[in-house]
Amino acid sequence: MVNLFTYLNLLNEFFSSHFQINTILVGDKKDITGKANIMYPLANIEYLDKVVRGGEDAYRYEIIIADLSTDESELTIINDCNSIADDLINWFEDTSKFEELELVSNVTIKPFTDSFGDRVSGVTFTITMTGFRKSCSNSIPISQ
């Protein structure tokens, strides 16, 4: 059955195998500053919500991809982070093992420069992933 961990594990699999990502964090973006030993570039995955639409579930995740920056390197880093975001979208679209899963490919990628304790630049975007929702009232744990 598809659940939030199905997609979280796939996102972790992608970022773990991507040569340009050194640290993967899962959780609220506000908690990034409290993390020790971050090796940039980083990817942060934050679960946002689930929408039930008829026979499918749609899970939304906010992704942050960031690297250390200076005024001179800001646009180069944003460009590199854009490329990693594109890689993620292409990976889901081109990988045959996701036949029952779908990444909604209408994604807006926004640049940012901020401080997570370090000055960083990068991109943030929200992805929506859908899968077939198996509904069987006989499997609900309630007394009859």
Image (cartoon, helix red, strand yellow):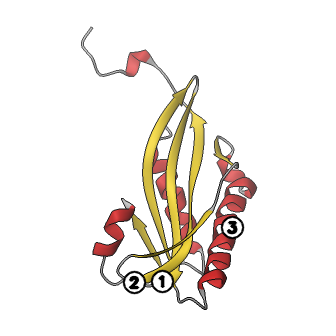
* Figure quadrant of the C terminus: top left
The kind of residue on which mark 1 rests is Tyr
Q: Quadrant of residue 30?
A: bottom left
Q: Which residue is the site of mark 3? A: 87
Label disc, if present, on residue 124 of the rendered structure: none
Q: Are marks 3 and 1 in contact (CB under 8 Å)?
A: no
Does 43 appear above or below 39? above
Q: Which residue is the site of mark 2? A: 118
Write the residue at 32% across / 74% down. 33
Q: In this orientation, does residue 27 appear?
A: no
Residue 74 vs residue 49, the one in the foreground = 74
Q: In this orientation, does residue 103 appear?
A: yes
N-terminal of the pair, mark 2 or mark 3, is 3
Q: Position of residue 16 (x, y in %)?
A: 52, 72
Residue 105 vs residue 90, the one in the foreground = 105
Label disc, if present, on residue 40 of the rendered structure: 1
Q: Are marks 2 and 3 in contact (CB under 8 Å)?
A: no
